[in-house]
Image: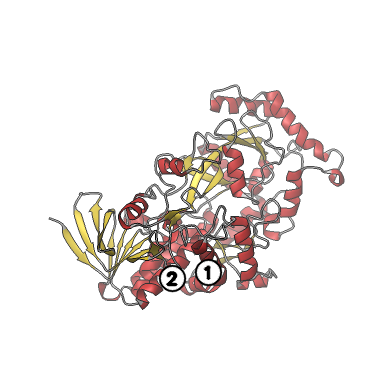
Amino acid sequence: MTAMQQSDVLVVGGGLAGLVTALEALRAGKRVTLVDRDTPERLGGLVLWAFGGMTLVGTPLQARLKIPDTPEMALRDWLRFGELAPDDEHARQWARYYAERSRAEVHDWLLELGVKFMPAVNWVERGRYGEGNSLPRYHIVWGTGRELVRRLIAALHAADSGGRLQLLHRHRITELDHQAGRVSGATAVCERSGAQVRLRAPVVVLAMGGINGAHEQVRANWPRDRPMPSGMLNGAHPFADGRLHRWVASELGGQISHAGEMWNYAAGFPHPYPHFAGHGLSTIPCKSALWLDHSGRRIGPEPLVTGFDTHWLCQRVAEQEKPWTWHLLNWRIAAKEFALSGAEHNLRIRDMQFAGFLKETLLGNHRLVRQMQRESPHFLVDETLAGLAAKMNALTCSLDIDPAVLQATADAFDANFVRGARLHNDEQLRRILHARQWGPDRLRTCKPAPLQMRGAGPFIAIQVQLITRKSLGGLRTDLHSRVLDAAGQPVDGLYCVGEAAGFGGGGASGRRSLEGTFLPGCILTARAAARSIDIG
């Protein structure tokens, strides 16, 4: 027998966008059913694992650091870096919406929830030629994404007067109920018992994430004009499989746009204790590491350096002969610069231990480097380059790395320092020196020095490969987060928020993001949907 439940708003997906939608609907007096495929302790989805970085415009922290940012400047950077087409109306509208409202509707709203930000603004995605973020905008949530989820769940329960919130964990939506073009609910299946539940609601909000959790969808939608590596790791949520996207497109005429645009990372390695098949960790690549191909030669002629253009880095890695590349560095560099994206391995920030965070920033995060040395076979350490080459070959079951080639690669880089700093002529060194002009980057970026500098060892090689992360495309929506059909008309009763909507409009970022736009994009689209539902 199929059970039946009734509410005013049905939210599909318990990630950040779903939680914000449910919270705002509850605050507006609605009865809300929130359906999530995961277990109760994983309510919050991918944001639970997220580092918590947010691109925000015109904040008090920026003003305090004398960063003269404005929505007009941010929008200019966004449109230029994302290469949004002039006729991509809905994506461009959402880009403007973000630039103009991220301060009030994300930053200030989160402060009201009790969320705090670290007292620094980082400068990411500057662009290879300065065409990215023209100013620092990357704010970091104190406590990472985990603290953000905790605050939201607490607010959700505080707003649930009279038992108006129904939470269905471990349930999967199989189809939406609709008649004469109007959505009126959905059918869910309990993934433990197989029992069906009919969920009646005049409004359905899709917040099920993107498509990058399903590798077959990643490959099916990969742009044909861009290189695709033969192997990739998964850094997305495994439940973000695109099934509901395709259902809405086939049954309700919804438009999936920019499905081939993705925000992947170029330097991942397998999680030592994977949460799901193919689970990868994404490094924040060390700016001072040499990025090598499978044979131990430096990739060039333009060296690969993080922090400038992640989209370009991914393409360069994807076009290499083999699906992995190498980072070559020493312990001195790793202790200061090595980091992993996400909450799991940023314990001092996640657990809000400011003294410990400050100590590791100033003295080096030797704890994390030693942890990866112990736990990951892809993190190799040796006192000599010849010994490192042997370990690299053993890992890949090959003779790809000629020790003489690896030595020559290191020698060629170190030759930059023979004649003194006045005669440096290396693009990676120029970018490092530029990054070190900004205080937060200076704290996390080594002063340039020879790789083989006495006392800087041992040497480290990290085998890395492309790792999937976020979908930049999704279901086309208007500024009210209503799903649009092929004629550009709203599908009655159906909304889409967060990554499922390409963070607004079916792809507000275009081809590349200014980074840190994803969590705020979830909040902005969710709050827009809730406002529209309340007015309606």
User: Which residue is denoted by mark 1 in the rendering?
Assistant: 97
Can you tell which mark lies on residue 266? none
From the viewer's perspective, is residue 258 above or below residue 409? below
Direction from residue 332 to residue 109 in the image, left or right:
left
From the viewer's perspective, is residue 231 above or below residue 22? above
Q: Nearer the viewer, residue 526 or 399?
A: 526
Amino acid of disc 2: Ala
Q: Are marks 1 and 2 in contact (CB under 8 Å)?
A: yes
Gap in Å between the C-alphas at discs 1 and 2? 10 Å
Q: Is residue 271 visible?
A: no
Q: Choose the circle earlier in sequence order: 1 or 2.
A: 1
Instruction: Locate residue 470, reporting x and y percent.
Output: 48, 51
Can you tell which mark lies on residue 528? 2
Residue at (55%, 46%) from the top-left corner? 265
- The image quadrant that residue 294 belongs to is top right
Amino acid of disc 1: Tyr
Instruction: Locate residue 445, reporting x and y percent.
Output: 69, 50
Residue at (68%, 44%) from the top-left corner? 333
Direction from residue 20 to residue 4 in the image, left or right:
left
Direction from residue 7 to residue 75 in the image, left or right:
right
Secondary element under disc 1, as helix, strand or loop, is helix
